[in-house]
Image (cartoon, rainbow, N blue to C red):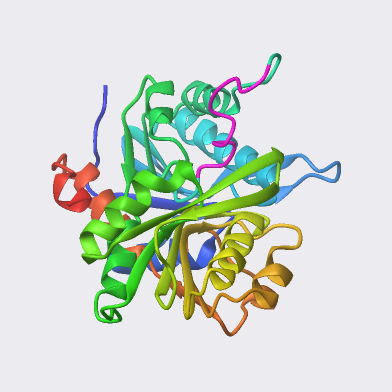
Amino acid sequence: MITHGNEIKLFAGNSNRPLSEAIAKKLNTALGEVEVGRFSDGETSVHIAETVRGRDLFIIQSTSAPVNDNLMELLIMIDAAKRASAGRITAVMPYFGYARQDRKARSRDPITAKLVADLLTSAGADRVLTMDLHAAQIQGFFNIPVDNLLGGPTLYNYYADKLGDDFIVVSPDVGSVTRSRKVAERLGCPLAIIDKRRPKANVMEVMHIIGDVEGKSCLLVDDMIDTGGTITQGAQALKDAGAKDIRACCTHAVLSGPAIERIDKSPISELVMLDTILLPEEKRLPKIKILSTADIWAAAIENVYLDKPMSKIYD
């Protein structure tokens, strides 16, 4: 039986402490006491240092790099809370890792998004809060409620007063068209699409651009930037097509491998990202701007705790 207790209880793993602390501050509370460490052989050790019996728990943890360590931290924290008789456990995952393998693209491929969904449920999560899932259908992999919050409005608000008559939104690939179209509609801008072919994973070849970008200020929109190949080659294609200014934005800045070097050398003048993944100081280029999502998470957590609808947050 779910009992809410008399206060929100927030706990955080090690993946993104600054965001967790910002969320707690917005909710006028403090993060709960939890010890997350390692045994000498590398196993994750968790101890919740305060009572959680019958309480409404929110465990904040992005499953970003190191992905496996952060995922295990989250699973073990959920298990510890469940065994401590927590009333309801919500996994707050600003970035949901392993989401890119959401179907069998080839024979004998795994579906890791479904596997992670099963692991979270088996560990004892009663609900999941996340943002901009790589594929919306991942919500259907769960048998518990999943709220897929939207990072787009934060980006819309940032660009709302930075538009000129020559502004155009560009989808870096066909898979991002729906997302880019929504941004274009909200900003009242035309849409262009970069048609590409990917010979193998993390290798992208630009084919051609659908739409007129010559002399335009372009905004590339993506949900995630990993190695930076798609976004930087797309930016170069726009420059070659005569674009006068090229910006980019994303929700999740994975930025692995050569991403930072590629972005630094690319024609992108500004890259705006949300803080769902903690970006180390050494990767913070002058052209990178990070926007906070603490307000969104705080509102979502409060609505879940009070059993209020989430529709206003989605709007």
Residue range corresponding to the magenta coloring: 96-106
The percent coordinates of residue 181 (x first, y second) are 31, 51
Query: Is 212 rendered above or below residue 124?
Result: below
Which image quarter is the N terminus in? top left
Would you say residue 104 sits in the magenta stretch?
yes
Does the rendering let one see residue 295?
A: no
Does the rendering let one see residue 141?
A: yes
Q: Report the predominant secondary structure element of the magenta stretch.
A: loop
Does residue 237 appear to the left or right of 158 in the view shown? right
Would you say residue 186 sits in the magenta stretch?
no
Residue drawn at x 19%, y 44% is 310
* Most foreground residue, 82 or 309: 309
The percent coordinates of residue 223 (x first, y second) are 46, 52
Does residue 38 appear to the left or right of 128 in the view shown? right
* Most foreground residue, 267 or 251: 267
* Most foreground residue, 287 or 301: 287
Residue drawn at x 53%, y 34% is 80
The percent coordinates of residue 249 (x first, y second) are 45, 65
Residue drawn at x 66%, y 45% is 67
Residue drawn at x 23%, y 42% is 304
Query: Is 265 rendered above or below residue 54?
Result: below
Query: Which residue reaches farthest bottom?
Result: 286
Does residue 34 appear to the left or right of 37 in the view shown? left
* Most foreground residue, 294 or 164: 164
Query: Which residue reaches farthest top?
Result: 107
The percent coordinates of residue 107 (x first, y second) are 69, 14
> How many dots with numbers?
0
Query: Is 198 rendered above or below residue 226?
Result: above
Query: Is 22 rendered above or below residue 43?
Result: below
Quarter assignment of residue 171: bottom left
